[in-house]
Image (cartoon, rainbow, N blue to C red):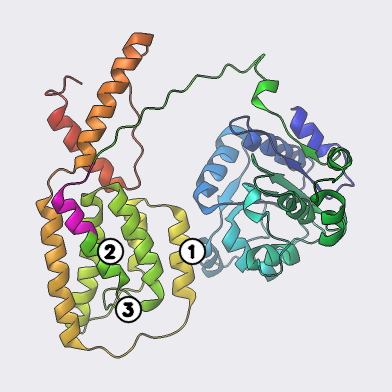
């Protein structure tokens, strides 16, 4: 409540930064501000956040605060336009969009007189004042003059200039130009006390130690379980790495090479089984080329959706599809050769029934349960994975081994 009142206190300010430490409820604080504005019948409300947090934002605003909210991305935008909604931003609903999508929608955002723009994980824009920061410069142009509420647990990481970048996102006139800020505060003899006083009216930071009186924190203990991959796992990893490093492949469009590389490396780090579905999707594409069939241009998007991968990857896939340009003419002998090569990779992957990391997980769970037993804690475990398919694999693996390990 204190933070929300701070954000609402001065209606003439161009915005504030709520910089509480992690876990103190910046999302809740921002939602309280949105609730107040909604109660005042102000409907031009926008939330900009990393792609992976969009669903969480929309869900929390709807379920915890009874505020209508919707994730707005390229798909939703096109669907709304196709159903007769001329301007998807001109509705009585809080729009939640990713930072990169907001940057791409510069003209549309600039046309709306936003009552407030909430920017979560605002430290991602800490270098926005630099001329070569395309995303930051786009948001600067589209949101000029709009009141902003910046949320970040790390307003300062490596340099005071990052703090300058954040404050400039609110109001470029707070500290003047970059040279003035450097001369006043950037040197060893900089007047830090003066900087703190100038930040006080629009930056509020609460630390965990400030709320220990009424927020009980659980003490955390970290255990690390090392492991080494098997020879087959190493061989498979090296094969995929070599495949990704080649100059050209028919398995995916050249403009999607970086994206496919990110996906495969994420899945390789998750489990061997998780990689198989992606390799099979690439194989289907190769076979379609060989059979001279139509290629599904949205195969990457479907793959990301089906495996429940990071939404940042889906956004990059959408950007790739938006790019123009055709791949070169098809050499069917090379397609056939690549198809045979991919079949070899799949054969290696399917021969790896259980990977070494799964056994390290068993050891970690056993150690964790032993430690929890000494503390009288319940024997419960939450396992986070990169891929939904890894979860399916681990469910089968744990069911097969828990009796043996008495878990």
Q: Earlier in the sequence, mark 2 or mark 1?
A: 1
Q: Residue furthest bottom?
A: 329
Contact check, label 2 and label 1, Cβ < 8 Å:
no
Left or right of residue 308, residue 70 in this image: right
The residue range painted magenta reads 228-237
Residue 230 at what x, y percent from top left? 16, 47
Question: As displayed, is residue 400 above or below residue 70?
Answer: above
Q: Earlier in the sequence, mark 2 or mark 3?
A: 2
* Residue 206 circle label: none
Residue 157 found in image quarter? top right
Q: Which residue is mark 1?
A: 75
Q: Which residue is mark 2?
A: 241
In which quadrant will I find the N terminus? top right
Q: Earlier in the sequence, mark 3 or mark 1?
A: 1
Crowd band around label 3 with a 10 angstrom C-alpha radius: few (<14), some (14–19), many (20+): few
Who's the residue at 47% across and 82% down the image? Answer: 324
Q: Main secondary structure of the magenta part?
A: helix
Residue 23 at what x, y percent from top left? 58, 31
Q: In this view of the protein, which residue sits in the foreground, 46 or 362?
A: 362
Contact check, label 3 and label 1, Cβ < 8 Å:
no
Mark count: 3
Q: Which residue is mark 3?
A: 247
Residue 107 at what x, y percent from top left? 69, 71
Q: CA distance from mark 3 to mark 1?
A: 31 Å
């Amino acid at each position: 409540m204190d933070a929300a009142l701070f954000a609402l206190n001065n209606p003439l300010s161009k915005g504030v930064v709520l910089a509480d430490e992690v876990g103190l409820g910046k999302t809740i604080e921002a939602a309280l501000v949105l609730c107040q504005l909604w109660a005042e019948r102000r409907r031009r409300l926008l939330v900009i956040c990393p792609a992976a947090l969009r669903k969480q934002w929309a869900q929390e605003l709807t379920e915890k605060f009874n505020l209508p909210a919707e994730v707005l991305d390229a798909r939703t935008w096109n669907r709304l336009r196709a159903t007769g909604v001329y301007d998807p931003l001109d509705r009585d609903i809080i729009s939640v969009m990713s930072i990169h999508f907001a940057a791409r929608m510069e003209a549309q955002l600039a046309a709306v007189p936003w009552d407030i723009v909430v920017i979560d994980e605002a430290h991602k824009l800490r270098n926005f004042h630099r001329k070569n920061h395309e995303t930051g410069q786009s948001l600067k142009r589209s949101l000029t003059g709009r009141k902003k509420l910046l949320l970040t647990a790390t307003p300062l990481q490596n340099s005071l200039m990052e703090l300058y970048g954040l404050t400039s996102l609110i109001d470029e006139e707070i500290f003047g130009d970059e040279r003035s800020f450097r001369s006043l505060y950037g040197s060893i003899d900089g007047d830090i006390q003066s900087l703190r006083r100038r930040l006080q009216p629009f930056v509020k930071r609460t630390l965990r130690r400030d709320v220990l009186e009424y927020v009980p924190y659980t003490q955390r203990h970290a255990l690390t379980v090392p492991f080494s991959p098997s020879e087959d796992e190493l061989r498979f990893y090296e094969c995929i790495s070599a495949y990704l490093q080649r100059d050209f492949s028919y398995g995916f469009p050249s403009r999607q090479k970086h994206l496919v590389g990110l996906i495969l490396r994420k899945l390789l780090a998750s489990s061997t089984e998780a990689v198989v579905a992606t390799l099979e999707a690439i194989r289907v594409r190769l076979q379609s080329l060989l059979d001279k069939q139509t290629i599904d241009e949205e195969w990457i998007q479907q793959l990301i959706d089906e495996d429940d991968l990071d939404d940042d990857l889906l956004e990059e896939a959408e950007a790739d599809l938006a790019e123009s340009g055709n791949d070169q003419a098809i050499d069917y002998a090379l397609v056939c050769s690549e198809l045979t090569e991919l079949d070899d990779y799949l054969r290696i992957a399917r021969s790896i029934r259980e990977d070494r990391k799964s056994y390290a997980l068993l050891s970690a769970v056993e150690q964790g349960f032993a430690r929890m037993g000494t503390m009288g804690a319940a024997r419960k475990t939450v396992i986070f994975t990169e891929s939904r398919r890894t979860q399916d694999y681990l469910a089968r693996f744990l069911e097969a081994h828990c009796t043996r390990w008495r878990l």
